[in-house]
Image (spheres, helix red, strand yellow):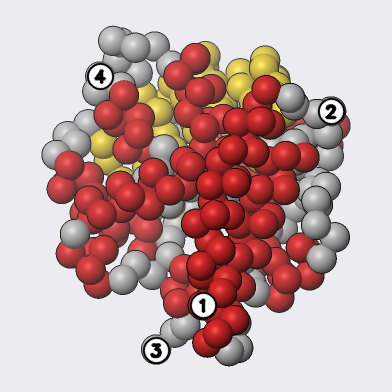
Amino acid sequence: MPRLSERINQHAHPDFLRRHPRLMDVIFWWFALVYQRVGTVRRGLGRLLPKGKSFTLIDAGCGEGLFLFWLARRYPQGRLTGLDHNAHNVAFAKRYAEACGFRRVEVARADLSRQAWPVPADYALCVGVLHCVADDLQFLQNLHRSTRPDGRLLLYSPLRPRRFWPFFEKWYRRWRHYEALHGRHSYAPAGLRALLAQAGWQVEDWQGAMHRPATAGFELYTLCFLGALHARHWWASAILAALVLPAAALAAFLNRLDRRFPGSHPNGVWLVARKAAPADHWKKNST
């Protein structure tokens, strides 16, 4: 049987969670507490999306539906489509949507790095996925094709990380965290803007996120959590597991502090971009 850490990295959900998908609400709440990007993205969506009006949105790389189902509750008039290439995620998200009775939510397996979604939407949401895609340019171009002529891209992406704890990167990779395992790109702000422009997107809004305080909280929590999963001795695992809750509380406090006193070198960015080129832009430029 695979280790728990391997099951987490593969998004292979335990049996009890598949039988009772609404228990995922606790995990969604936990993510919102610990990870600053969840609050950043939710606030950005709340400012942009029209309340009380119908719209269409695709969530590219929706995972278990952290943002997809938050949107379904907040915007019942919206028609939402969650797309993911991981079969475990798609199967679970479908069970969750059925358990919650979301009738305007569709979940499908799709690889947007290979082809566009055939039903263009008003908005394309993509959170923490772009840096994990092998061909990130093709992925952005397919998102371009997956939106209407006046469509918007709503993107959260990590930037080149500035680590708070010098030893964090070593253990982050050694313990094979999901993003350390699958991350393929490291973006500087100028490079990310250039990539978006090449794919036909023009940035309208750019908001840095996860500065030094939030980074410190995230890294401390991650070290405790992953350390508890991978410790060689039971007593070390027990000590680190006992530190997970205090580390999560500290991370939540530092996230709030980070919002009040942001720095000048964020580790992530939330941006809104509009379509600045027709869908056949790349073919014309290559001839």
Numbered label attached to residue 77: 4
Q: Nearer the viewer, residue 244 or 2?
A: 244
Q: Residue at x 60, y 65 (%)?
A: 224
Q: Residue at x 23, y 68 (%)?
A: 16
**CA–CA distance in space, label 2 to label 3:** 45 Å
Determine the image quadrant of residue 200: top right
Q: Are marks 1 and 2 in contact (CB under 8 Å)?
A: no
Reply above or below: 188 against 239.
above
Q: Residue at x 34, y 12 (%)?
A: 51
Q: Mark 2: few, some, or many residues within 10 Å (few <14, many ≥20)?
A: few
Could you tell me which secondary element the residue under label 1 belongs to?
A: helix
**CA–CA distance in space, label 4 to label 3:** 43 Å
- Number of the front mark, 1 or 4: 1
> Label 1, on which residue?
238
- Indicate the position of residue 151 as horizontal and vertical percent values: 51, 19
> Label 2, on which residue?
264
Q: Mark 2 or mark 4, which has the lower sequence index?
A: 4
Reply above or below: 182 against 263.
below
Could you tell me which secondary element the residue under label 3 belongs to?
A: loop
Q: Mark 1 or mark 2, which has the lower sequence index?
A: 1
Q: Which amino acid type corresponds to the residue marked 4 in the rendered image?
A: Gln
Q: Residue at x 15, y 48 (%)?
A: 99
* In-image side of 180 versus 58 (left or right): right
- Indicate the position of residue 75 as horizontal and vertical percent values: 30, 22
Q: Are marks 1 and 4 in contact (CB under 8 Å)?
A: no
**Does the image show residue 105?**
yes
**CA–CA distance in space, label 1 to label 2:** 38 Å
> Label 3, on which residue?
1
